[in-house]
Amino acid sequence: MAKKKSKKKHQEQQPLSPERFLREKARGLEIGKCFVSNDITICGEGHVVVSRLQKSGKISAAFYLVDIYCLGVKDSFYRLRLDEDEFEEMIDRMVPYNIEECSYEVAHNWIYGAIAFAEEAGIKPDKSFNLTQYMLEEDTDEVPLIEYEFGRNGKHFLIAKNKLEASRYLPTMKAHLGDNFDVSIDEFDDFDEEEDGYEPCTLIETQYSYQHPQYPQVLNVENQWIVPELCDPKNSTALDDKLTDRILALPHDSLRRDLENLILYYTGMTCDHLPDNEPEEFNGVIGLCVMLLAEVGNEDSSLDVVLEVLRQSPDFYEYHICDSGADIFVPTIYKLGQHKLDKLMAFAKEEGIYTLCKSQILSAVIQIAKYQPKRRDEVIEWFREIIQFALEKLPNPQFLDSELLGIMISELIEIRAKELLKEIRALFDTRYVESIICGNYKEVEDDILSLEHISNNYCLLDIHKRFHHQKATLQA
């Protein structure tokens, strides 16, 4: 039997995918602020927020839409490694939902109590709860029980927007409850959106559908010694200054070809079948090569290779990139693609690309307006075209979905894009914008008009600073 490899005493911490971070780390973090809608018992539905505090000062949080009358957890999502001000901004955007701070025990009991009540009717939590549950403590006797009243008048009470929505639940409810439940089907919504400052939306999500080409099956490199260095698990998070300088001292054309070949080769190795590695065996070669290409790459073959990485599946992205996309891609795309806006536009319009991958393109183009103010008009027109494209394609989510629309509007706030307020209003009018990400239209308008200067949130361009930041950020 082969001997097991001994782990190095000073093994550098390796990045985890968001899913693994939630499953393996989240419950070990200190519980932070929690919130619940203070009118949840009146409306029968409300929002619950649970946050966790990381040693680095970052905040991870999960957001739950809870129906206490019937359906339990209707939706949920998470955000990892938020700065404190980013978390507070998200909480501020939830003011229309009447949230107020509460204890963790209150949040826990509303969520799990609603789930248990829904299960009596045969209704399971939304599939998103498969991951967001790990932001919560396990539902055991360790968490004090708080008795809340679920349902209405002692019965399950299904509130459906229309007959189609009701048809999703009624057969299951009848099978479990017989006729012992009530139903309300509201075909019309009399809610005054302008008066209440609330803009309901229908969330749509892109389904990944890219069919990748054949990638190189043989690795050809001219500078052989860089391969073991870039594939060494201890370097997967970042390269130290000495190794970075040694690599960049190579002839740039030769190094560029090697980096491109490494990216395509390892993309081909893992695009269909991801390795089942332990964290200490993680190979960060793709991310490292993308970052190094910012120094020696060109706007043709190198940019094409970086975009090919961004065409890969969500699983590929989460394995190789985790939540470091902004650090890995944005500066590189800015450097390589700043004079290739047509190529970036073509990518932004591609069908079936993972939303987080497309968001890196939008962020990189925003950096052009920040670093090169004289090109602001060019950037504004670029986004005007993207918005017009979105308006033509919606409600088809395969080009731009609710999350990407919210991200794009947040990016436009960064450069105070008052020239695009008309187009932004048109996006909100579609009711497909994820407003929790960017705020409702009134909040967006206020943010854009009330601040005169462009945000100072510039991406890092110096390769050494990028690696230092990457290493610090990935520490929990």
Image (cartoon, rainbow, N blue to C red):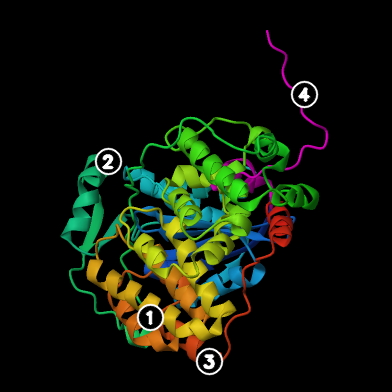
Q: Earlier in the sequence, mark 1 or mark 3?
A: 1
Over which residues does the magenta segment extend?
1-29
Q: Is residue 290 left or right of residue 179?
A: right
Task: Say few, some or many: other residues with alpha carbon within 10 Å of mark 1 (under 14 / 14 to 19 / 20 or more).
Answer: few
Q: Position of residue 230 (x, y in %)?
A: 66, 40
Q: Earlier in the sequence, mark 4 or mark 2?
A: 4
Residue type highlighted by circle 2 = His
Q: Position of residue 348 (x, y in %)?
A: 37, 63
Real-space CA distance between mark 4 and mark 1, rounded to the nearest whole angstrom: 56 Å
Q: Amino acid at mark 3?
A: Ser
Q: Amino acid at mark 4?
A: Ser
Looking at the rendered structure, the secondary structure element under dot 4 is loop
- Residue lying farthest top? 1
| Residue on which the image places disc 2 | 176
**Which of the numbered marks, if any, corresponds to residue 10?**
none
Image vertical order of residue 208 relative to residue 46, above or below: above
172 inside magenta stretch: no
Reply above or below: 295 against 438: above
State the residue position of label 4: 6
Residue at 33% across, 47% down:
210
Image spot of residue 232 (x, y percent):
69, 36
In primary-sequence order, the first of circles 2 and 1 is 2
Q: Point out the frontmost of discs 3 and 2.
A: 3
